[in-house]
Image (tube, grey):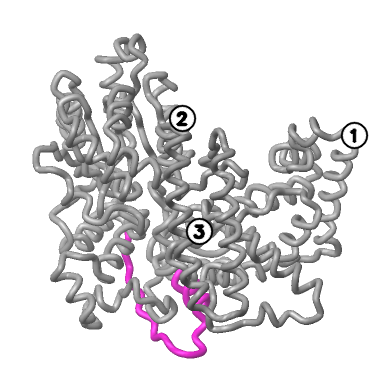
């Protein structure tokens, strides 16, 4: 029997023992890059089904399986033949499923949360000066106060985990996660409901699951360890989002099982050796290449940086050299098929042609996760409504146009058509609004996003997300008055709204390129967005100068620069340093090959 086969059998035995409902044992399965983590997850599910499937169907209990994307959910469902005892969903979906019937409790949580935010804004308003930021804050206060006032009139709340949530009774992504985490942590009844419905909870990519929810699941497991099995699958070296739990593996209780998959089925031998070296100073995990793995190629190219250097040309020349080294024509020329990873997203944004849209938003720390996965409030408005509509219009797909308008436009909502005497007039109004919006592309024009937003606001074609309301009101006021001194720039600004102000000046084509990037349809990328993906040719750009950031530093990782005093202080206190972050990035990018 091969090492790989022996490891699979051993792992299956460990998981079967843990997934024993008479004596459940929670576990953290270490699964490094290319180890077949999803295969192990599916194997665990199939073993459980063989033993408890019939019992669960009769008792209406399920195994909850949380994974990171809808695509990953679909892949797992397909591999288990859509067995009904498994509830496979994203973290946002299960969070909403847990809280969606507790409207009174949600209302109380929202009321408290809104009051805190209003008080914070009012305090800043009293200290701040008149100007643009003051006007934006006034709109925010008014909007939040209006939402607070109407909470008592809302009978039920709604939420869409896969899009924009802009209805009067809608919750946003952050609120749903926050509510679910707090309810699970503080309310014994919610814990009992989770345990009774889902005696087993499997979490894929656990290192990137939102930290408050991970802590809440830990609390549930600790209180109900005799009847609840929590299984985490992942690798802390591959944590790529800032809202994941730092040091997850160290937080796992000692009494949990901690099996590991050590065979890397993806990478050639030289690359396995290389990525082991990258993580050697971080933890004790070592991988082995598969028995039939090829030798592979790893090359380091050093380039003298300086003013005037054409980095695009340098990277193209390196790709040509790799044709000779690897005897592989697909490194260069018309048949080129390379995935290029950069240190920071704005480096990929410049190469991909969407920097003016991306960079202002990426500078806001609380925006980063949502910007990188496309869930940031405001993004689905453009990506799922405007972009989808324009693409359907360009392809003359009238059925798709009608479907998008029917799904998203308040002009033809069921409630609107029901309350209007002449519903045909509303349909014509929506049709005219679509034509008016599409006219902005006449003559091969590339309209700015702010012009699209203004057009939609004027026609009422789509509902405007709350994040854009202050901007639309301010722009309209400035357009209506010859003098706009009330909205003059001052140093007292709201960084989040300023970021959107700048991003909305970008062209529509940049938004389209950004959507391709986060959908992994671009030849450029970073460590975000490549979870579980693999490529036959990988080029990693190591360039601290172009990155311009302090979050990462290859110079420090390689010892060319000393750690800063902050790095040293964080290391002493057990906190993450820029060196730790860079090592993780380097590991993830190199291990895609």
Q: Quadrant of the C terminus?
A: bottom left
Relative image position of residue 30 (x, y in whole percent): 21, 44
Region of the chain picked out in magenta, as a range: 297-320
- Residue 328 sits in which quadrant? bottom left
Q: Where does residue 248 sit, x and y in percent of width and height?
A: 22, 50
Q: CA distance from mark 2 to mark 3?
A: 29 Å
Q: Whole-percent x and y of residue 558?
A: 24, 75
The answer to which image quadrant residue 418 occupies is top right
Horizontally, is 407 left or right of 364 in the view?
right
Q: Give the farthest residue toward the left.
A: 255
Secondary structure at badge 3 equals: helix
Q: Is residue 226 above or below residue 103?
A: above
Taking the spot 86% from the left edge, 64% from the top edge, the residue there is: 443
Comes first in the chain, label 1 or label 2:
2
Between 410 and 18, the one lying in front of the other is 410
Q: Which residue is mark 3?
A: 371
Crowd class of label 3 (few under 14; some 14 to 19; many from 20; radius 10 Å):
some
Q: Nearer the viewer, residue 204 or 459?
A: 459
Mark 2: few/some/many CA within 10 Å (<14, 14-19, 20+): few
Residue 320: mark in rendering: none
Closer to the N terminus: mark 2 or mark 3? 2
How many labels sit on residues? 3
Q: Residue 147 at x, y = what percent? A: 57, 50
List the residue tagged with mark 2.
101
Q: CA distance from mark 1 to mark 2?
A: 36 Å
Nearer to us of marks 3 and 1 is 1
**Rendered image: mark on residue 422:** 1
Q: Is residue 247 magenta?
A: no
Instruction: Tell me the quarter of the image containing the N terminus.
Output: top left
């Amino acid at each position: 029997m091969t090492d790989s086969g022996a490891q699979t059998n051993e792992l299956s035995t460990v998981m079967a023992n843990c997934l024993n409902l008479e004596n459940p044992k929670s576990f953290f399965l270490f699964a490094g890059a290319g180890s077949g983590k999803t295969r192990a997850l599916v194997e665990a599910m199939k073993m459980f089904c063989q033993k408890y499937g019939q019992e669960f169907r009769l008792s209406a209990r399920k195994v909850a399986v949380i994974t990171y994307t809808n695509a990953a959910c679909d892949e797992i469902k397909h591999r288990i033949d859509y067995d009904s005892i498994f509830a496979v969903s994203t973290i946002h979906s299960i969070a909403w499923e847990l809280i969606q019937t507790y409207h009174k409790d949600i209302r109380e949580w929202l009321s408290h949360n809104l009051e805190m935010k209003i008080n914070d804004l009012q305090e800043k308003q009293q200290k701040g000066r008149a100007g643009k930021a003051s006007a934006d804050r006034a709109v925010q206060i008014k909007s939040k106060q209006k939402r607070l006032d109407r909470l008592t009139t809302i009978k039920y709340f709604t939420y869409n985990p896969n899009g924009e949530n802009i209805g009067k009774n809608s919750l946003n992504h952050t609120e749903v996660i926050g509510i679910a985490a707090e309810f699970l942590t503080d309310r014994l009844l919610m814990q009992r409901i989770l345990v009774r419905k889902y005696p087993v909870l499997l979490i894929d990519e656990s290192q990137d699951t939102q930290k408050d929810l991970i802590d809440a699941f830990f609390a549930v497991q600790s209180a109900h360890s005799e009847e609840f099995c929590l299984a985490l699958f992942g690798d802390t070296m591959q944590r790529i989002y800032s809202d994941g739990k730092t040091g997850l593996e160290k937080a796992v209780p000692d009494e949990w099982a901690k099996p590991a998959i050590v065979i890397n089925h993806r990478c050639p031998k030289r690359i396995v050796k290389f990525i082991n070296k990258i993580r050697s100073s971080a933890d004790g995990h070592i991988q082995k290449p598969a028995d039939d793995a090829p030798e592979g190629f790893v090359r380091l190219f050093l380039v003298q940086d300086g003013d005037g250097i054409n980095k695009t040309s340098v990277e193209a020349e390196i790709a040509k050299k790799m044709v000779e080294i690897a005897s592989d024509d697909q490194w260069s020329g018309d048949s080129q098929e390379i995935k290029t990873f950069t240190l920071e997203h704005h480096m990929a944004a410049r190469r991909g042609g969407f920097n003016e849209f991306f960079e202002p938003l990426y500078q806001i720390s609380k925006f980063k996760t949502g910007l990188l996965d496309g869930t940031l409030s405001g993004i689905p408005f453009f990506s799922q409504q405007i972009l989808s509509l324009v693409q359907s219009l360009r392809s003359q797909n009238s059925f798709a146009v009608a479907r998008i308008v029917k799904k998203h436009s308040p002009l033809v909502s069921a409630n609107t058509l029901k309350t209007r005497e002449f519903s045909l007039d509303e349909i014509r109004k929506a049709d005219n609004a679509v034509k008016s919006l599409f006219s902005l592309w006449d003559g091969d024009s590339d309209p700015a996003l702010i012009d699209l937003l203004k057009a939609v606001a004027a026609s009422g074609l789509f509902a405007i997300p709350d994040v854009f309301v202050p901007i639309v009101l301010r722009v309209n006021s400035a357009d209506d008055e010859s003098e706009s001194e009330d909205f003059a720039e001052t140093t007292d600004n709201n960084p989040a709204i300023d970021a959107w102000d700048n991003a909305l000046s970008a062209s529509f084509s940049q938004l389209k390129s950004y959507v391709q990037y986060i959908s992994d349809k671009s030849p450029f990328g970073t460590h975000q967005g490549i979870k579980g993906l693999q490529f036959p040719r990988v080029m990693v750009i190591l360039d601290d100068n172009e990155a311009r950031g302090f979050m990462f530093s290859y110079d420090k990782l390689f010892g060319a620069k000393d750690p800063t005093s902050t790095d040293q202080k964080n290391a002493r206190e057990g906190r993450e340093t820029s060196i730790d972050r860079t090592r993780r990035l380097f590991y993830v990018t190199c291990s895609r090959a």
